[in-house]
Image (cartoon, rainbow, N blue to C red):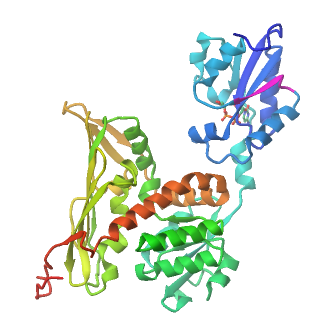
Amino acid sequence: MADGNQGKGKVVITYGTFDLFHYGHEALLRRAKELGDYLIVGVTSDAFDRSRGKLNVKQSLIERIKSVENTGLADKIIVEEFKGQKIDDIRKYNVDIFALGSDWVGKFDYLEEYCDVVYLPRTQGVSSTELRRMTAKTLRLGCIGTGIFTDRMIREASYVSNVRVLSVVAADADGLKADSTYDQYKSAESFEELADIVDAVYVNTKPALRPGVLEKALEAGLHVISEGPIAFTVEDVKRLQKLAADKGLVLIEALTAMYLPGFQRLKLLLESGIVGEIKDIDASYSIVPDSLDFRDRYSSNFYNMSSRTLLPALVYLGAKPKDVQVICGYEQDMCTWSKYNLLFETASATLKTGRGVKTEGDMTITGTDGYIYVPAPWWRLEYFEIRNEDLRDVKKHYYECAGEGQRYLIKEFYLYWSDPAIYDMAKGTLEELEVATVGIIERIGSDQCITLANHSSRFGGGENV
Ligand code: C2G
């Protein structure tokens, strides 16, 4: 049924986000209008843009509609809310011509079944992306804690536009202090002083100091991205999350793997049922560092590596396992080996982590129609295979992980910082993930954890923990 525009002559429809409205948009609307007598403009809703991966739109829907209205070229403005809407609109408004800029050539040919499809020349030299870049704020980042993780963060941040590392400070139990290795960066002696220099901090201190440092950073009004887990009891995690929320600050864990294109893509494929229903996830993550202090319980794998180890299960199967079994092996005071068995409603997962113990770092995701195999190191997630009963039918997927991977995480952190609405959408899931991780490691050392006999052959002895 046509909707109110009968007798209006030739009806033309066009769509767009029209963010930071510019003369390219205006020229497009004028050309579209010239194709007929009555122009309908579909402006994309914020949710629709996010669902099609356009995450950095600066203006609200109302502002964008106002800009289109101000041109006086649109006879009718509608909102584009979902993917299949164009066909519905064409039918509903008896559209004769669908018009879009030449950057979309070929993409909408399927609409020729319903009306004429015209691609209009795109105006050169102007784009919303470029305008967004020019109007974007710069995030001034500081690093608390020194060493290879911080060096890597500095390197990777240099690849993210609008992020600048301005300060690096060391931290110990007494507070912040200068480190001469980093004297090309500004230093600070207190969190308040640091908050005058930077907007946000990357925290990479010894695990034992982490919760205290995070609290002081948030108290000083700094947004935080921290190595994880951010604390070691669920109570502390929730307290820090509440503090950040009360102060309107971003607090996220530096879970690099989760933000990699491959990890995100695999998530979408699994949700679309690519291997049917997931029955099991089996993954390992281990490192043998150059040196380890076996007398320091904070060197234990779960204080350093549990978030990354548990990640694929808690993201792909959900952050609410029904039951968890933890097995731990120690050398002196340090937990070197952990195995987590997670039980979900219809699936299970086994995650293994070694620090001072080495094993294959691959991942298998078992499903009812096939399985995913991710070769080591799965946490770089650049390549995976979809395999099934027919051994010759292997689908290979490759998604580049540029540099060392942290740039994707920093980019996301920048997005959360610059656009609180986007952070609000992601926050609940991120918080749940943190709580679930710490809820699991909190069991270590309790009667809910099975402890293996202490194998201390490297040191003599051999007594149980
Ligand atoms: N455009 C143009 N010249 C420019 C920039 C944009 O002609 N320099 C055109 C685009 O080709 C598009 C319209 O202006 O036809 C709106 O552009 P965007 O706001 O970038 O919207 P877009 O993401 O292209 O959405 O369902 C939405 C549509 O698919 C188009």
**Could you tell me residue 21's position as x and y percent?**
79, 40
User: What span is in magenta?
Assistant: 73-79
Ligand 1 placement by image quarter = top right
Mark yes or no: residue 391 visible: yes
**Could you tell me residue 220's position as x and y percent?**
65, 78
Mark yes or no: residue 117 visible: no
* Location of the C terminus (image quadrant): bottom left
Asked if residue 342 is among those painted magenta in the image, a careful observer would answer no
**Could you tell me residue 437's position as x and y percent?**
38, 63
In which quarter of the view is residue 97 placed? top right
- Residue at 70%, 36% (x, y): give it: 17
* Location of the N terminus (image quadrant): top right
How many numbered marks, from 0 up? 0
* Left or right of residue 260: residue 242: right
In which quarter of the view is residue 110 placed? top right
Asked if residue 78 is among those painted magenta in the image, a careful observer would answer yes
**Could you tell me residue 183's position as x and y percent?**
58, 84
- Residue at 56%, 57% (x, y): give it: 411
- Residue at 57%, 60% (x, y): give it: 413
Given residues 183 and 71, the one toward you in this image is 71
- Residue at the far bottom: name it: 174
* Left or right of residue 373: residue 42: right
* Residue 45 in the image: above or below residue 84: below
